[in-house]
Image (cartoon, rainbow, N blue to C red):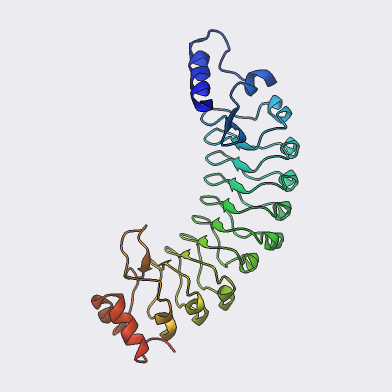
């Protein structure tokens, strides 16, 4: 019902004369707010905005805010006023930074800031300890602040398509992670600390410069999807056969299983893989692979 009302209002906006498409008053913005599944939701996506209208910060009741696909270069400090937010969507803008005041959003559970121009993340984000989903993909990040070690409830983290050369140490403290996406960065290795992420079900590190795999990777027995494609991997750890939930050699990017064939694998591993994952695991159980 709420969505239908919103659509009708948008139709009115398009047919009205004058400056009807500019958001110039609190009441005008509030017209776009709806109730969805018990949440106060406002979407100002795809409106060509270069800056956030000041009146937005008066809507203190907002719980879900979508500012995606605009032309925003800055999110002002007034963001701190929206302390009831549980979902904040900023993806697809031109942001080079996030305001330190984001740390005041202590109820925030989901933050989408992918496809921006972020070069750093404020340490204050570590105060958002309720975060469960964080996407910072497609930015220009080289690292994360140590304070993000506090995100102990984080379950999904996407850092793909950045400039990260070493897995940020704070990630190894995110013990609740089930999904970690580090594809298309500049990684040359994974630390043995990876074993701390015992809950991981999906680990994607394709498109990096990994040369070897740590033995500790083989302790992540909950893994259902492990994407190692397009690296520089020549051999696999002997204990990889312990990853029994990887049920097959996978080829489609979204398929569960082990993605590894797009690497310069050496014989005999390369030849063994022609028989599928079962053949590889039998080979490893018999003592093959990197010890």
Image location of residue 60, percent across then percent down = 73, 32
Image location of residue 61, percent across then percent down = 70, 32
Residue drawn 60% across the image and 47% down it: 111
Left or right: 233 with respect to 252? right
Residue drawn 42% across the image and 67% down it: 224
Residue farthest toward the top in the current orientation of the protein:
17
Task: Residue 25: tell me if it is visible.
Answer: no
Residue farthest toward the bottom in the current orientation of the protein:
287
Left or right: 24 with respect to 192? right
Numbered disc total: 0
Which of 90/34 is in front? 34
In the figure, residue 132 lies in which quadrant?
A: bottom right
In the rendered view, tell whether residue 254 sits above or below residue 213: above
In the rendered view, tell whether residue 261 sits above or below residue 184: below
Image location of residue 135, percent across then percent down = 55, 51
Which of 11/47 is in front? 11
Q: Quadrant of the C terminus?
A: bottom left
Task: Residue 52: tell me if it is visible.
Answer: yes
Image location of residue 15, percent across then percent down = 48, 11
Which of 92/129 is in front? 129
Residue drawn 53% across the image and 73% down it: 190
């Amino acid at each position: 019902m709420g969505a239908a009302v919103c659509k009708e209002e948008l139709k009115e906006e398009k047919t009205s004369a004058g400056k009807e498409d500019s958001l110039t008053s609190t009441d005008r913005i509030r017209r776009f707010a709806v109730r969805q599944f018990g949440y106060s939701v406002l979407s100002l996506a795809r409106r060509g905005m270069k800056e956030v209208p000041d009146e937005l910060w008066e809507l203190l009741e907002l719980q879900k805010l979508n500012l995606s696909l605009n032309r925003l270069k800055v999110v002002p400090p007034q963001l701190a006023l929206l302390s009831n937010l549980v979902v904040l969507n900023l993806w697809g803008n031109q942001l080079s930074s996030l305001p330190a005041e984001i740390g005041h959003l202590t109820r925030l559970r989901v933050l989408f800031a992918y496809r921006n121009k972020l070069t750093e993340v404020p340490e204050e984000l570590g105060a958002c300890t309720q975060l469960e989903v964080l996407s910072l993909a497609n930015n220009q990040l080289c690292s994360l602040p140590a304070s993000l070690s506090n995100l102990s409830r984080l379950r999904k983290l996407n850092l793909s398509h950045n400039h990260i050369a070493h897995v940020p140490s704070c990630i190894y403290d995110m013990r609740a992670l089930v999904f970690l996406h580090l594809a298309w960065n500049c990684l040359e290795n994974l630390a043995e600390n990876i074993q701390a992420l015992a809950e991981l079900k999906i680990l994607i590190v394709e498109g990096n410069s990994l040369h070897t795999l740590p033995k500790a990777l083989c302790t992540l027995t909950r893994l259902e999807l492990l994407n190692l494609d397009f690296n520089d991997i020549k051999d696999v750890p002997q204990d990889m056969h312990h990853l029994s939930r990887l049920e097959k050699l996978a080829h489609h990017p979204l398929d569960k299983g082990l993605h590894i064939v797009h690497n310069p694998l050496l014989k005999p591993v390369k030849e063994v893989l022609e028989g599928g994952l079962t053949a590889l695991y039998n080979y490893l159980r018999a003592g093959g692979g990197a010890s």
